[in-house]
Amino acid sequence: MTNIDIQAEHTILMKDHLQKEEIVVLYLPVTEGAQAKVILNFNDKCLMVEIGNYSISNELLTSLLEDQTYRLDSFPSDLKEEITLIHTICSATTQRVLSHIKYHLVYTDISEQLFSIKSRRWRVDGQDWSPIPSSLSVVVDARNIPRFDEHTCNNLQESLNEEFEPLLGMRHLHRAKNESIPHHKWIDATIAAELAIKEVFIRAKPELEALLLEVPSPPLTKLYGSILETYLGERSPYLSVIGKGVEVRNRLVHKPTSERVDAQEAVNYVNDIERIIFHLLSLLNPQSKLIQQRLRLINF
């Protein structure tokens, strides 16, 4: 085994901090025989994690010294696990400190995502710093926004004339779209689907309002399935998405530490929920050109 030094710099994701703060230094144990020094600078929105005497295998040290790509996938699986553990320790240390500050000191200006990675480096025997190999992760979220041309303007004017107001559930859909944390993104999208189906039923059949609001609701798959078909003539074509979405949401709510949501999967789920809601709106108001325009755009 060989000891190395680790330095990880992170950007604190927060609004501009108007009050000047002292630089804070904290210490946390990370492994047996090693502790992290955390340097917190709110003025520069910077959190630095420094770990000295961190033990790695001799095989990993040899590979790090020979590596010129800095790509995690160029390492064999056993060494990849060692490197991943370093990243995990740096992230967990940063998250732990910022979570305490955000939630226990009530620093609401810090975003839910807490931080982003700026750099992570290593060195041995006081030599020059080198980047710690990492993997590139890309999440694709293509947002189709229509041009505000004459066609769109006319459709909007017609919708305003019809007094066809947006659903309250759309606010949760947009919160989900703008949320960066997959866990919260998934929960907000599911809430949007739950609110939307009730709102659409109440608009279509006002006599159902007391039943929908005062009595425990049937499963969401039934609301979007046989009940939707009974009252608006068509089932949702996305019943499997709704079923899986509810299952994952329930695990996230009741077992928050045991369920992890992939970032790309969460983005895809939110886009599916948007299709589900606009399909609902097309059943509620088949004549709405504005709704049909959006459906064509998101189903392209």
Image: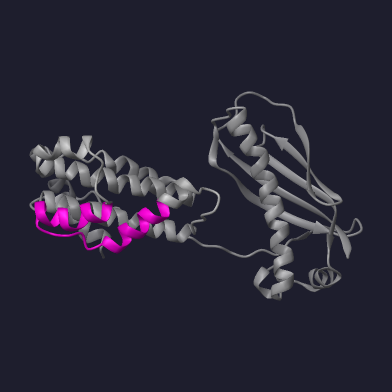
Is residue 248 magenta-colored?
yes
**Residue sitting nearer the eye, 148 or 68:** 68
Residue 58 sits in quarter: bottom right
Q: Nearer the viewer, residue 260 or 133?
A: 260
Q: Is residue 78 above or below residue 144?
A: below
Relative image position of residue 278 (x, y in whole percent): 22, 53
* Residue positioned most to the top: 19
Image quarter hosting the N terminus: bottom right
Q: Is residue 81 left or right of residue 50?
A: left
- In the picture, residue 236 is in which quadrant? bottom left
Q: Residue furthest right?
A: 125
| Residue at the image point whose x is 72% and y is 64% from the top | 83
Residue at left offset 66%, top offset 63%:
134
Q: Magenta span covers which residues?
A: 220-249
Give the main secondary structure, helix, strand or loop, of the magenta stretch.
helix
Instruction: Answer left or right for 213 relative to 38.
Output: left
Magenta region includes residue 161: no
Q: Is residue 162 left or right of residue 70?
A: left
Q: Is residue 180 visible?
A: no
Could you tell me residue 241's position as x and y percent? 32, 61
